[in-house]
Image (tube, rainbow, N blue to C red):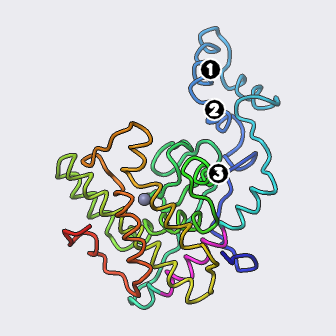
Amino acid sequence: MRWEGREQSDNVEDRRGSGGGGGGGGRIALGGGMGTIVLLVIVWLMGGNPLQFLQEQGGGTGSPGVEAPASPEEEKTKQFVATILKDTETIWGEEFKKMGSTYEEPKLVIFRSQVRSGCGFAGAQMGPFYCPTDRTVYIDLSFFNELSQRFGAPGDFAQAYVIAHEVGHHVQNLLGVSSKVHEAQQRGGEVQANQLSVRLELQADFLAGMWARKGQQKYDFLEQGDLEEALRAANQIGDDTLQRQAQGQVVPDSFTHGSSEQRVRWFKKGLQSDRFDPNNTFQTDDL
Ligand SMILES: [Zn+2]
């Protein structure tokens, strides 16, 4: 993918390393997790001052919350993420204007290991996500290594697809699609809630595909093999593929994101679309 030299977004917040997480005891407690909380209770039970304990822990090297410095490679990935985010802001800004409305840009938080989001605490193991409450995309950059090594989907355009998918959830949030889905999920049973989740996720894949189309028209950013990278990523994170790897069997009723074939199909549909119909994945029997 051609991305270097293009403008980067101002909406990226880096919460890795010191100074990024609110500082002091709070961040240490965050980094230390349950172990720290247990220790604090012990300190308190023994008549100590837990706050003082936290401060002492925070000062030392090698304590649970101290983070490794970012590598030059990670810094480059951060610039890549900021560039892709800017590309989404430009493209969706134009698309919303065509629809007679204004695109409100999301934030993107880069974190390491765990993060406090508007949707609660989250760990890196759950992968990148979008929180509608604070209109923010959260990503631990190590996910891209996982995408390459564990999921077998390397390449910068595979990474761009992941970001564009999360931004797709923001587009759905702005257009009121997400809130309608969540209301319907409250009314229905678990299987129905899962089916609605699949439709929402496939639509985010569609939006990622449509973004790729518009981006290509505007920036000519695709290089040989890029689309294959994104399609491989969509295929490798399909529910059936993930379930087969994790548990050796596939349970379609428990799908929340769609099968590999569906994810690839809706991304491709987006690649061929000039406009977005918010009903596209909801009013069809042919997912
Ligand atoms: Zn999603």
Between the residue at mark 2 and the residue at mark 1, the CA separation in whole angstroms equals: 9 Å
- Give the vertical position of 150 relative to 60 (above or below): below
Residue 168 quadrant: bottom left
Name the residue at 27% across, 51% down: 194
Q: Is residue 287 left or right of residue 173?
A: left
Q: Is residue 200 left or right of residue 134?
A: left
Name the spot of residue 1 as percent of width and height, x first.
65, 74
> Dot 2 surroundings within 10 Å: few (below 14), some, or many (20 or more)?
some
Residue at disc 2, CB closer than 8 Å to ligand 1: no
Q: Which amino acid type is shown beneath numbered disc 1?
A: Leu
For this rendering, which residue is in front, 57 or 142?
A: 142
Residue 32 quadrant: top right
For this rendering, which residue is in front, 16 or 168?
A: 168
Between the residue at mark 3 and the residue at mark 1, the CA separation in whole angstroms equals: 35 Å
For this rendering, which residue is in front, 176 or 241?
A: 241
From the image, tell me which residue sits under label 3: 145
What segment is highlighted magenta in the picture? Answer: 82-94
Residue 224 seen in render: yes
Extreme residue in the top direction: 46
Name the residue at 63% across, 18% down: 39
Instruction: Give the main secondary structure of the magenta stretch.
Output: helix
Query: What secondary structure is marked by label 3?
Result: helix
From the image, tell me which residue sits under label 2: 29
Nearer-N-terminus badge (2/1) = 2
Nearer-N-terminus badge (3/1) = 1
- Give the vertical position of 83 relative to 61 (above or below): below
Residue 132 seen in render: no
The label number, if any, that marks residue 64 in the structure image: none
The label number, if any, that marks residue 40 in the structure image: 1
